Image (tube, rainbow, N blue to C red):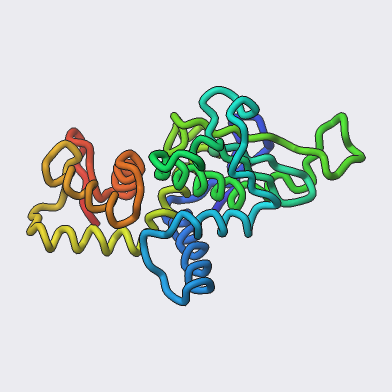
Amino acid sequence: MKWVKDRTGRFAKRPHYLPEELDSRCEATISAFLKNRHDSTEFPISTDDLTILLEQNANTLDLYAEPSGLGVDVEGVTDFYSSRKPDVRINKRLTEDVRLENRLRTTLTHELGHVLLHGFMFDGVMRQDSLFDATEKAESNQCKRATMLTTSETDWMEWQAGFACGAYLMPITALTRAVQQFIQKEGVHGPTIFLQTDTGTALVDEVVKAFSVSRDAAKVRLLQRGFLAESAEVGSLF
Ligand SMILES: [Zn+2]
């Protein structure tokens, strides 16, 4: 991790991580949690486990936040404080509707990314009008569906939380193993699997099944880590 200028103007400087650094941090979090809780690391991670992991790291977790109190299209919110761990609120539609479970899993891990990667940025940050109240909320970060998985890197907090979401749900070692098994099973030749092909579709299906994620989450993760390539690009698998 290195510190770079924050072009959003929120902070004087902000942390920049290489994808490999985020992968290894997120995998360490998931592995330690699963080993401690189940004495083994198996995928997909259950939604209960994701909820417990987020509860352990946040100050409070509200899984039944009223949509009207969150803002249009907001699925999750992380409220940062200057002197304690963040509070997380999840839109209750995701918790109550079983058909939205993948979106719930995405949102839980996206907010976990904010809590673990960004909570420390607000330590000691106080609003100018409340210098003497250390429990004052420093910032309320609203996360919308459209940018839950990925967004422009300029919006670095959202981008990092989106990347972390994929890295928690599909940790790099397990993902690499799943891709290698797929290649052997399917007898794939050549260095690149393209997204817009039957093989690309089959790989996305495999990852969706292995990690209980949405197709969008699987696609974004496979593209980000170079296991899949957009048809116009040339990339290598490993
Ligand atoms: Zn976010």
Count of numbered tags: 0
67 vs 236: above or below: above
- Of residue 162 and residue 58, the one placed in the foreground of this image is 58
The C terminus - image quarter: bottom left
Image spot of residue 27 (x, y percent): 45, 62
130 vs 191: above or below: above
6 vs 113: above or below: above
Image spot of residue 168 (x, y percent): 45, 55
Q: Residue furthest top?
A: 72
Image check: 58 left or right of 164?
right
Image spot of residue 216 (x, y percent): 33, 39
Q: Residue at x 29, y 57 (%)?
A: 210
Image check: 43 left or right of 228?
right
Q: Residue at x 58, y 45 (%)?
A: 114
Where is residue 66, by image quadrant? top right
- Of residue 151 and residue 168, the one placed in the foreground of this image is 168
Q: Residue at x 17, y 35 (%)?
A: 231
Ligand 1 positioned in quadrant: top right
